[in-house]
Image: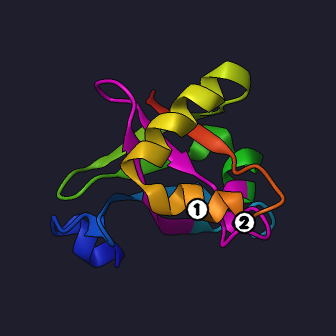
Protein backbone atom coordinates (compact mmCIF):
# COMPACT_ATOMS: atom_id res chain seq x y z
CA UNK A 1 0.00 0.00 0.00
CA UNK A 2 2.86 2.42 0.74
CA UNK A 3 4.01 2.20 -2.88
CA UNK A 4 0.49 3.08 -4.11
CA UNK A 5 0.36 6.08 -1.76
CA UNK A 6 3.74 7.30 -2.94
CA UNK A 7 2.52 7.07 -6.54
CA UNK A 8 -0.40 9.33 -5.76
CA UNK A 9 -3.18 6.90 -4.85
CA UNK A 10 -3.86 8.03 -1.30
CA UNK A 11 -7.33 6.69 -0.64
CA UNK A 12 -8.58 3.52 1.00
CA UNK A 13 -12.21 2.66 1.75
CA UNK A 14 -13.23 6.27 1.15
CA UNK A 15 -10.61 7.73 3.49
CA UNK A 16 -7.53 9.79 2.67
CA UNK A 17 -4.38 7.86 3.61
CA UNK A 18 -0.83 8.93 4.39
CA UNK A 19 2.31 7.01 5.28
CA UNK A 20 3.30 7.46 8.91
CA UNK A 21 7.03 6.93 9.43
CA UNK A 22 8.04 5.99 12.96
CA UNK A 23 10.88 4.23 14.74
CA UNK A 24 10.23 0.94 16.54
CA UNK A 25 10.15 1.52 20.28
CA UNK A 26 12.15 -1.65 20.99
CA UNK A 27 13.91 -2.43 17.72
CA UNK A 28 14.92 1.11 16.76
CA UNK A 29 14.15 0.18 13.15
CA UNK A 30 12.26 2.40 10.73
CA UNK A 31 8.58 1.57 10.34
CA UNK A 32 6.07 2.86 7.80
CA UNK A 33 2.34 2.47 8.24
CA UNK A 34 -0.54 3.60 6.02
CA UNK A 35 -2.95 5.59 8.23
CA UNK A 36 -6.21 7.41 7.48
CA UNK A 37 -5.99 11.14 8.09
CA UNK A 38 -8.38 14.05 8.50
CA UNK A 39 -7.72 17.72 7.75
CA UNK A 40 -7.17 20.01 10.73
CA UNK A 41 -6.20 23.37 9.30
CA UNK A 42 -3.82 24.15 6.45
CA UNK A 43 -0.94 21.75 7.06
CA UNK A 44 -2.08 19.97 10.22
CA UNK A 45 -3.62 16.50 10.13
CA UNK A 46 -5.46 14.28 12.59
CA UNK A 47 -5.01 10.52 12.85
CA UNK A 48 -6.89 8.03 15.04
CA UNK A 49 -5.28 5.11 16.87
CA UNK A 50 -8.21 2.72 16.53
CA UNK A 51 -6.19 -0.49 16.19
CA UNK A 52 -9.18 -2.69 15.53
CA UNK A 53 -10.85 -1.61 18.74
CA UNK A 54 -9.23 -3.76 21.41
CA UNK A 55 -5.86 -2.04 21.89
CA UNK A 56 -3.72 0.80 20.62
CA UNK A 57 -1.94 -0.11 17.36
CA UNK A 58 1.83 -0.68 17.37
CA UNK A 59 2.41 2.50 15.39
CA UNK A 60 0.89 4.48 18.29
CA UNK A 61 3.38 3.02 20.79
CA UNK A 62 6.25 3.71 18.39
CA UNK A 63 5.07 7.28 17.77
CA UNK A 64 4.77 7.99 21.51
CA UNK A 65 8.18 6.41 22.26
CA UNK A 66 10.01 8.46 19.61
CA UNK A 67 7.85 11.52 18.75
CA UNK A 68 10.84 13.54 17.57
CA UNK A 69 11.57 11.05 14.80
CA UNK A 70 8.12 10.98 13.18
CA UNK A 71 7.36 12.01 9.62
CA UNK A 72 4.55 11.63 7.13
CA UNK A 73 4.34 11.17 3.39
CA UNK A 74 1.32 12.29 1.41
CA UNK A 75 0.50 10.90 -2.04
CA UNK A 76 3.16 11.97 -4.49
CA UNK A 77 4.97 14.10 -1.88
CA UNK A 78 8.19 14.11 0.09
CA UNK A 79 8.47 13.12 3.74
CA UNK A 80 7.64 15.92 6.17
CA UNK A 81 8.83 15.87 9.77
CA UNK A 82 5.89 16.19 12.18
CA UNK A 83 5.33 16.81 15.86
CA UNK A 84 2.59 14.55 17.27
CA UNK A 85 0.28 15.79 20.00
CA UNK A 86 -2.36 13.56 21.63
CA UNK A 87 -5.57 15.53 22.02
CA UNK A 88 -7.62 15.42 25.18
CA UNK A 89 -10.61 17.14 26.75
CA UNK A 90 -12.54 19.59 24.62
CA UNK A 91 -9.89 19.57 21.87
CA UNK A 92 -10.27 15.81 21.45
CA UNK A 93 -14.08 15.95 21.52
CA UNK A 94 -14.24 18.71 18.92
CA UNK A 95 -11.82 16.87 16.65
CA UNK A 96 -13.62 13.56 17.21
CA UNK A 97 -16.97 15.08 16.19
CA UNK A 98 -15.46 16.24 12.88
CA UNK A 99 -13.82 12.84 12.31
CA UNK A 100 -17.03 10.95 13.13
CA UNK A 101 -19.03 13.17 10.77
CA UNK A 102 -16.51 12.62 7.97
CA UNK A 103 -16.21 8.88 8.61
CA UNK A 104 -19.20 7.39 10.50
CA UNK A 105 -17.55 3.97 10.31
CA UNK A 106 -14.98 5.09 12.91
CA UNK A 107 -17.73 6.32 15.24
CA UNK A 108 -19.42 2.93 14.94
CA UNK A 109 -16.17 1.12 15.83
CA UNK A 110 -15.59 3.49 18.75
CA UNK A 111 -19.07 2.80 20.13
CA UNK A 112 -18.23 -0.92 20.31
CA UNK A 113 -14.91 -0.43 22.09
CA UNK A 114 -14.32 -0.05 25.83
CA UNK A 115 -11.35 2.25 25.27
CA UNK A 116 -11.35 5.79 23.93
CA UNK A 117 -9.43 5.97 20.67
CA UNK A 118 -6.51 8.39 20.86
CA UNK A 119 -6.73 11.28 18.39
CA UNK A 120 -3.32 12.63 17.42
CA UNK A 121 -2.63 15.98 15.78
CA UNK A 122 0.37 15.96 13.44
CA UNK A 123 1.90 19.39 12.99
CA UNK A 124 4.76 19.99 10.52
CA UNK A 125 8.09 20.82 12.19
Question: Residue 108 got which mark?
Answer: 1
Q: Nearer the viewer, residue 83 or 35?
A: 35
Q: Position of residue 86 (x, y in %)?
A: 67, 35
Q: Nearer the viewer, residue 9 or 118?
A: 118
Q: Residue 37 vs residue 63: left or right?
A: left
> Residue at 39% of width from left, 30% of height from top?
40
Which quadrant holds residue 89? Answer: top right
Q: Nearer the viewer, residue 99 or 8?
A: 99
> Could you classify mark 1 by the number of other residues whose Cα lies within 10 Å: few (under 14), some (14-19), or many (20 or more)?
few
Q: Residue 84 vs residue 14: left or right?
A: right
Question: Residue 61 got which mark?
Answer: none
State which region is magenta.
31-60
Q: Position of residue 58 (x, y in %)?
A: 71, 67
Question: Residue 112 got which mark?
Answer: 2
Is residue 42 highlighted in magenta?
A: yes
Is residue 21 highlighted in magenta?
A: no
Which quadrant holds residue 113? Answer: bottom right
Label 1 near label 2: C-beta < 8 Å? yes
Amino acid sequence: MARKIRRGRGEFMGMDVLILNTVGRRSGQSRETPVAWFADGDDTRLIVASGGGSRHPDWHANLMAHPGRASIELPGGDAVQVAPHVLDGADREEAWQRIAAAQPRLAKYQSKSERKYPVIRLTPR
